[in-house]
Amino acid sequence: MALRTILKYPDKRLRVPGKPVASVEPALGALLDDMAETMYAAPGVGLAATQIGLALRVFVLDLQQNDEAERATGLQVFINPEILERRGEVVWEEGCLSFPGIHEDIHRDGWIRARALDRSGQPFEVEAEGLYAVAIQHEIDHLDGVLLVDRVSLLKRRFIHRKMLKWHQAAQHRESHEEPEPPGRPAL
Ligand code: NI
């Protein structure tokens, strides 16, 4: 297993939509292990393949460690996810591993029914609400090349853009001084 680098906004690769996985081969398992390891190390509760520069419709999720989760999911793998049904509305303060330090209220569907393939290629369905529903929608956005900045006002978008440019400057500084990145809140 290996830690992958999580791309940070405004990296253009985050805008490349994922392609459906044609068939779930054993080789995909190594990638899924890397994604889970990278998510836990971040620390994060969700990570999409597009966030590590792979244009594939795959994400991993684990709400176990999060107090806000209405139910613990354990590690879940979603391959070629689709939302089949959506109801209601929820506003959730979301963080994203590609936007360190940024937390914004985002409007999402409050309840969803979704379908995907698991790591052995078997189809499964979930009904989700609260953070679980928010996380699935957030990760599917990533697979479509849609980011947190696309779901906020123009004013906030400019603010986030400036803040992220400063984040990259600070990251370069840390790198040249070999300082570790300060830990953040778990994000998606
Ligand atoms: Ni994210």
Image (cartoon, grey):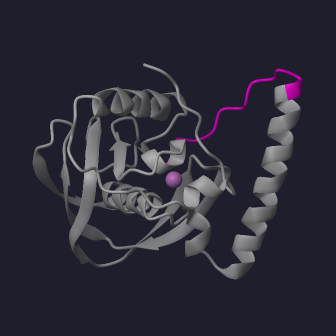
| Residue 153 image position (x, y, % from top left) | 65, 80
Nearer to us in this view, 29 or 154: 29
Would residue 187 be seen by someone viewing this image from the given angle?
Answer: no
Q: Is residue 152 above or below residue 81?
A: below
Q: Which residues are magenta?
A: 176-188
Tell me the quarter of the picture where residue 29 sits.
top left
Tell me: 64 left or right of 106. Answer: left
Up the image or down, 144 lies above or below 101; here it is below
State the residue at coordinates (59%, 34%).
5
Residue at left offset 25%, top offset 77%: 87
Q: Residue furthest front?
A: 22
Residue 40 shown left or right of residue 169 in the figure? left
**Place of residue 175 in the rendered image (x, y in percent of width and height, measured from the top left):** 82, 28
Majority secondary structure in the magenta region: loop
Measuring 15% from the left and 42% from the top, which residue is drawn there?
A: 121
The answer to whether 55 appears left or right of 76 in the picture is: right
Q: Nearer the viewer, residue 16 or 161?
A: 16
Q: Is residue 94 magenta?
A: no
Q: Position of residue 169 (x, y in %)?
A: 86, 44
User: For the image shown, how many numbered marks are present on the structure?
Assistant: 0
- Residue 45 in view (yes/no): yes
The image shows residue 81, relative to residue 78, as above or below, that is below
Q: In which quarter of the view is residue 180 placed? A: top right
Horizontal and vertical percent for residue 96? 55, 52
Residue at the image point whose x is 64% and y is 57% from the top: 12
* Quadrant showing the N terminus: top left
